[in-house]
Amino acid sequence: MVCFYKLTKNNTLEDSDSGIGLCGWLLVGFSLLLMLVTLPISIWMCIKIVKEYERAIIFRLGRILKGGAKGPGLFFILPCTDNFINVDMRTITFDIPPQEVLTKDSVTVSVDGVVYYRVQNATLAVANITNADSATRLLAQTTLRNVLGTKNLAEILSDREEIAHNMQSTLDDATDDWGIKVERVEIKDVKLPLQLQRAMAAEAEASREARAKVIAAEGEMNASRALKEASLVISESPSALQLRYLQTLNTIAAEKNSTIIFPLPLEMMQSLMNR
């Protein structure tokens, strides 16, 4: 079980807007005076650089400075009283480890995925959560379990895009207070138990055999109807059947050279002798 908690009810950023007090201003003045005395050596300690894809959150006497994150480029800090944290603003990807999930129709499947996210607000990512990356990873695992637990096996196998979209929306809403923007979620693989795979393969094979038998039966029925119509046509002429018989023998002889002995009807011989 994963638990996310917050010790204070008030927003951290609201507290940071309050003043640092008289003692704090004295310390800041002393730090500024020390910097001026030690020039130009102290200048190398006061000027910092952040890259294009980074932002710097400056803490002065433990409080976040007004104005939010600094960068990219140069920024200025006071020695002794100021420190800063760099936050990477690039898109980060991580794999969701395979999760054993019990579906709605009581089937155990193993599902994994991949999440793409980035830090949208560097100040919230530093002030509102201890480790935004670890929290997002844990939340993605629990969200995957919760979403798949409401689906049956057929929906998981066929509606991956819908499941990924639901996960993306849920994660994005949950991480909004952390300054995290979940850009994309993808379901990578759905692994079924071996026995279930065999059962599904047998079911599919049986279904294909049933369709094949139905198609064969329909073909037999159509062929019998055609033969019935042909017999009705042949019955109208007595010699048509003999001609069809000779045509069949001619076809057989063309395929395989052989001697075929067949009887002739007496009616045909009598008609020839009368002529």
Image (cartoon, rainbow, N blue to C red):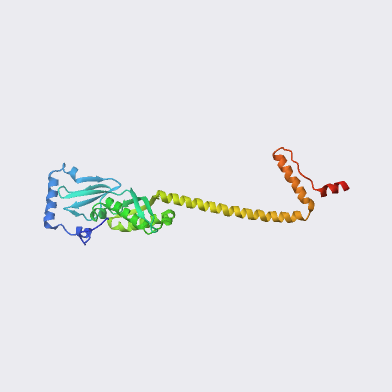
Position of residue 273 in the picture relative to residue 139 (left or right)? right
Judge whether 268 appears above or below 146 on screen: above
Q: Nearer the viewer, residue 61 or 210?
A: 210
* Number of numbered discs on residues: 0
Residue at the bottom extreme, as displayed: 9
Q: Quadrant of residue 66?
A: bottom left
Instruction: Tell me where residue 227 appears, x and y as whole percent.
Output: 69, 54
Does residue 275 show up?
no
Position of residue 72 in the picture relative to residue 218 (left or right)? left
Judge whether 106 appears above or below 255 on screen: below
Residue drawn at point x = 75 percent, y = 53 percent: 234
Instruction: Tell me where residue 12 appears, x and y as whole percent.
Output: 22, 58
Instruction: Tell me where residue 162 appears, x and y as whole percent.
Output: 41, 56
Does residue 220 show up?
yes
Position of residue 230 in the picture relative to residue 191 (left or right)? right
Q: Nearer the viewer, residue 165 or 255?
A: 255
Q: Nearer the viewer, residue 231 or 171?
A: 231
Residue drawn at point x = 53 percent, y = 51 percent: 209
Residue drawn at point x = 42 percent, y = 57 percent: 155
Residue drawn at point x = 13 percent, y = 58 percent: 21
Instruction: Tell me where residue 177 appears, x and y as whole percent.
Output: 28, 58
Rendered-image quadrant of the N terminus: bottom left
Position of residue 207 in the picture relative to residue 148 (left or right)? right
Q: Nearer the viewer, residue 241 or 42?
A: 241
